Amino acid sequence: MGANANAPIIIKRKKVVGGDGHHGGAWKVAYADFVTAMMAFFLLMWLLNATTEKQRKGLADHFSPTIPINRSSGGGDGALSGDSIFTEETLARSGVGATSPQEEKRTISELPFEQEMLEDLETRLLGAGAEALLSEQELRHIVTRISDEGLVVEIFSLPGAPLFDAQTDAPQPLFERLVTTVGQVFALAVNDIAIDGHSRSVPVVLSENPVWERTIARARAAKVLMEAEVEPERIDRLVGHADRDPVTADPLAVRNDRVELLLLRRDVPDLRRPRSAQTDDVSAPTEEPAGPDGGVDPAPGETDGAAEDAPLDP
């Protein structure tokens, strides 16, 4: 007993690990990384589907440190539109070419004054109450909209209230009243004016299709009424569309008998002149200079057909 009394006392402690077969909490970190990666993946897929090509290009260039020397500039919507302040210089050096003030096209957002002017004229035309230029019955024949080309005023016929005579296709007094009122509103601006004539289709049993002549005649009638309110040189064009541009599913509907009066933007080119339309040139024809024999001198580089066929003397 005395010998065993000096022996060291060994205390064995058993460590109890919680979680049993789950190996602690290390798996939670890996699972969290996996969920984060999946969330980022699905967010990327959503962005690819919800954004446009221009926006995706801007996002790609945002993470690229070489925007100024890229051959294709960014497509962001910020102050620089995805470009760098040095883009004009780097594009010229890289051979792509920079933009010039003459080639730059201005959009609607860059013409706030003209946009407000068009909106004000539209409000004046469709005004209600004491300032109304037209009655409610007359306003039923008018639809207005502001497009990239300018302010479009559409004057159209309705069932039971046509704007043109059914037999002679002559303009009715209501049509003259509407066009005159629109001309008075357009007189408040200095922009050019375009007139487009449209017609409903006619039955195929007719031997001749009069829609082309009909739409040109309607545009000319509107031109005469407009020239009484505005300067004649402001009339930029007359176009007859025949029945090629119906606004209803039924091409025979009366609603397709209409005339569109356009107050054109000053800095936007002609966008609506179709190839299939007949255009009436409102400018005066130029006369060809007469030759010595009363005929027309051939243009430079051209020869007279009779002289060309004559035999040469030996």
Image (cartoon, rainbow, N blue to C red):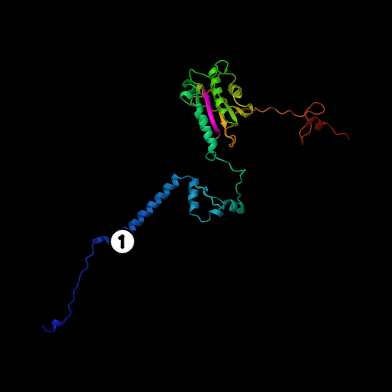
Residue found at the far right of this picture: 314
Comparing 35 with 205, the one in front is 35
Q: In the rendered image, which quarter is residue 150 located in?
A: top right
On the image, numbered disc 1 is attached to which residue? 26
Q: Quadrant of the N terminus?
A: bottom left
Q: In the rendered image, which quarter is residue 10 located in?
A: bottom left
Residue 10's place in the image compared with 138, above or below, is below
Residue 53's place in the image compared with 214, above or below, is below
Q: Residue 296, how many percent across, how many down?
A: 77, 28
Residue name at image x 25 percent, y 61 percent: 21
Which residue range is magenta in the image? 149-156
**Is residue 238 shown left or right of residue 51?**
right
Tell me if residue 204 can be seen: no
Q: Residue 162, how many percent across, how many down?
A: 51, 19
Q: Is residue 135 magenta?
A: no
Graded by Cα atoms within 10 Å as few (under 14), some (14 to 19) or many (20 or more), the crowding at tag 1 reads few
Comparing 169 with 154, the one in front is 154
Task: For mark 1, give the secondary structure.
Answer: helix
Q: Is residue 152 magenta?
A: yes
Q: Amino acid at mark 1?
A: Ala
Q: Quadrant of the C terminus?
A: top right
Residue found at the far bottom of this picture: 3
Q: In the rendered image, which quarter is residue 179 located in?
A: top right
Q: Residue 257, how many percent across, how many down?
A: 53, 22
Tell me if residue 178 can be seen: yes
Q: Residue 119, how many percent across, how many down?
A: 51, 32
Residue name at image x 54 percent, y 37 percent: 113
Residue found at the far left of this picture: 1
Comparing 79 with 10, the one in front is 79
